[in-house]
Image (tube, rainbow, N blue to C red):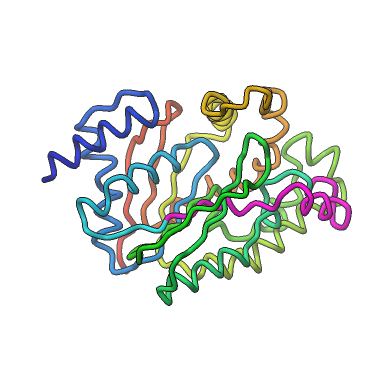
Amino acid sequence: MLKVLIDCIHNNFIEFTNKEVSKKEIEKKILPIFFFLNNSKKNMFLISGSQGIGKTTILKILNKNFYRFFGKRLLTLSLDDFYYDKSKRNLLSKSVHPLMITRGVPGTHNIKEIFNIIEKFKKSQYPIKIPIFDKLTDSKIKKRKIINKKSDILILEGWCCGSPALNKEYLHNNINELEKKFDKKYIWRNYYNEKLKKEYSELYKKFDGLIFFKPPSFSCVLKWRYNQENYLKKLNRNKSIKGMSKKNIIYFIQHYEKITKWMIKIMPKKADLAIFVDKNQKIKSIEKKLKK
């Protein structure tokens, strides 16, 4: 049975990434994620890590195989699907700070909707309707994903999932041009950090397990996010939608830089399962937190 699972994961990995991976690597570096979820007495997990690090790929592989091999249904949510649309963010840009027009930081997600889904999951109230956000057009689509069958495990995946609020010294230290030019009075940073401290912290407390994917450095994120954008363009049938250029992405990821670097520093010790990824997006090693 284990051999069949490894074969399935191997085929899925090639299908989803168009990259080769050895079956030995799968056994040592991907199967532990399956066993961690299956063997845990917990049933609500966060998966976090920088943009383009491979969280979505792992989630697809889990969705494809978990029920078949472990008999447990997964309900998987992506934090990205709960972004506010442009009209809502436009209001925030006028009432809070102009940088709130760009999706990404805490305060640009519909957290209440995630809380509602969590309650339905806990009470087994189906169907559950999940929103879908199109990153290429930067907008929600009308269609929703419908979950009709009772799920055993809930997973929320997102770039900043599980992150605690930043300390004031680090928050107010300018680390890129975006902060230097457009947030001189720290209004934007203070706002998203308060959101992280309150609403997002309350959300993360609902979950009882954390898997963190750690990149080697933030410098890898530009390349990964650029590759991700090109992949989305290939999938898109509407060729009139151009998506972001490399210059756009350089500007875009500066919105994520501070929290991402904060998480790289502190999250490996906080995570129940810390997954270390190299610059080629391959898993180097996995560390499981020792039980106290």
Q: In the depicted view, which residue is nearer to us: 92 or 63?
A: 63
Q: Closer to the camera, 259 or 10?
A: 10
Quarter of the figure with residue 19: top left
Residue at left 35%, top 63%?
Answer: 149
Q: Is 87 in front, or is 256?
A: 87
Where does residue 274 sit, x and y in percent of width and height? 39, 49
Judged by its main secondary structure, the magenta piece is helix
User: Quarter holding the C terminus?
Assistant: bottom left
Image quadrant for the N terminus?
top left
- Quarter occupied by residue 166: bottom right
151 in relation to 108, above or below: below
Nearest the camera: 144 or 91? 144
Residue 80 image point, x, y percent: 58, 48
The image shows residue 162 at horizontal and vertical percentages of 52, 58
Q: Which residues are magenta?
A: 76-100
Residue pictured at 74% horizontal, 43% vertical = 102
